[in-house]
Amino acid sequence: MTCPHLEYRADGDGRSFDTPRAYCAAAEQFVQAMRADVCNDRYNLDHATDCEIFRAHESRDDTTLDDGPEGGQS
């Protein structure tokens, strides 16, 4: 399964590239080509269990706001 957070960008961080580079939206940064190969199912990994970045991103998405002032509600 291809990682849903991996995309290829021809620019970013104030720079432009001749060849699009792998960008991990979960990590919010460009990743090395080898990491992108792993994310693109070259090694038949399950992102939900094998990728620490994916797991961390998913756990952030699962959090909910509390009812207190820090959660943005009063």
Image: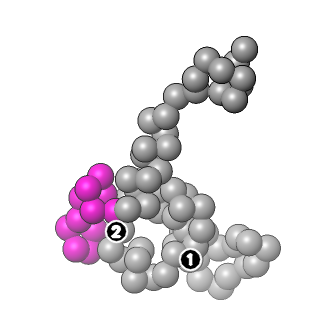
Residue 71 horizontal/vertical position (percent): 65, 27
Is there CB contact under 8 Å for labels 2 and 1? no
Residue at horizontal 34 percent and vertical 62 percent from the top = 51
Give amino acid for label 1: Arg
| Residue 14 visible at all | yes
| Label 1 neighbour load within 10 Å: few <14, some 14-19, many 20+ | some
Q: Position of residue 32 (x, y in %)?
A: 49, 81
Residue found at the far right of this picture: 14
Tell me the residue at 47%/56% (across/down).
5
Q: Which residue is mark 1?
A: 21
* Secondary structure found at label 2: helix
Q: Which residue is mark 2?
A: 40
The answer for how far apart the CA atoms under marks 2 and 1 are is 13 Å
In magenta stretch: residue 73: no
Which label number is shown at residue 63? none
23 with respect to 62 (left or right):
right
10 Å crowding of disc 2: few (<14), some (14-19), many (20+): some
Question: Is residue 47 part of the magenta span, yes or no?
Answer: yes
- Residue 7 seen in this snapshot: no
Stretch in magenta = 41-51
The amino acid sitting under disc 2 is Asn
Quadrant of residue 47 within the rendered picture:
bottom left
Residue at the (79%, 73%) spot, across then down:
14
Q: Spot the residue most to the top.
A: 74
